[in-house]
Image: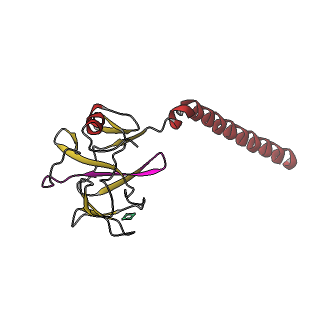
Amino acid sequence: MAVEKERRNFLGAALGLFTVAGGVGALAAMKYTWDPLPSVKAAGFTTIDLSTMPENVLVTEKWRGKPIFVLKHSKNMKSDPRDVKIGDDVYFVAIGLCTHLGCIPAYFPDTKTFDCACHGGQYDANGKVLKTPPPRPLDIPPFKIEGKKLVLGEEGPEYKKMLADGLTQKV
Ligand code: FES
């Protein structure tokens, strides 16, 4: 009798495990179906929500293997033609690689500068060169504004105007 009960308990546990495994498999299959197609990922679009970003705090995202700097300007920061404006908010968006030899500059909120430790280059909060050797401002990646979101990898009208005005180069 005890053997029969043990056998039933074992079968019940085995059936339970089988059901859980099946459920996990079904969820994995659903996730695979819902995930973007590989081609969309390969196209390299990255969407960043700007609505909750704090002022004067550098946020670094990744796009096509490169660091992307997004800095929400405080109200007292100098305006610039390279500003990305969304309503009353102003952002600076750039590829976070020094235009000298490609090191990643660090942002210092007190001085509001990007300093490159490799050879002493320095940029202001709009990515413009304050101290050489960097030969040009930090490059701006292709972007598009969608509501309060920034889509990296798409060329929106604001980015196209910056290119046409010679404020950045195509990357
Ligand atoms: S790589 Fe930045 S100053 Fe040389």
Q: Is residue 77 left or right of residue 136?
A: left
Q: Nearer the viewer, residue 19 or 87?
A: 87
Q: Position of residue 10 (x, y in %)?
A: 79, 46
Instruction: Please report the bounds of the magenta region as a residue range.
Output: 62-77
Which image quadrant is residue 148 in?
top left
Q: Position of residue 124 (x, y in %)?
A: 23, 59
Which image quadrant is residue 160 in?
top left
Q: Nearer the viewer, residue 60 or 12?
A: 60
Q: Nearer the viewer, residue 144 or 161?
A: 161
Q: How is the image coloured?
A: secondary structure
| Residue at the (76%, 43%) spot, across then down | 14
Q: Residue furthest left?
A: 76
Ligand 1 lies in quarter: bottom left
Q: Is residue 65 magenta?
A: yes
Q: Is residue 8 magenta?
A: no
Q: Is residue 120 left or right of residue 24?
A: left
Q: Is residue 147 above or below residue 167?
A: above
Q: Position of residue 155 (x, y in %)?
A: 35, 33
The C terminus - image quarter: top left
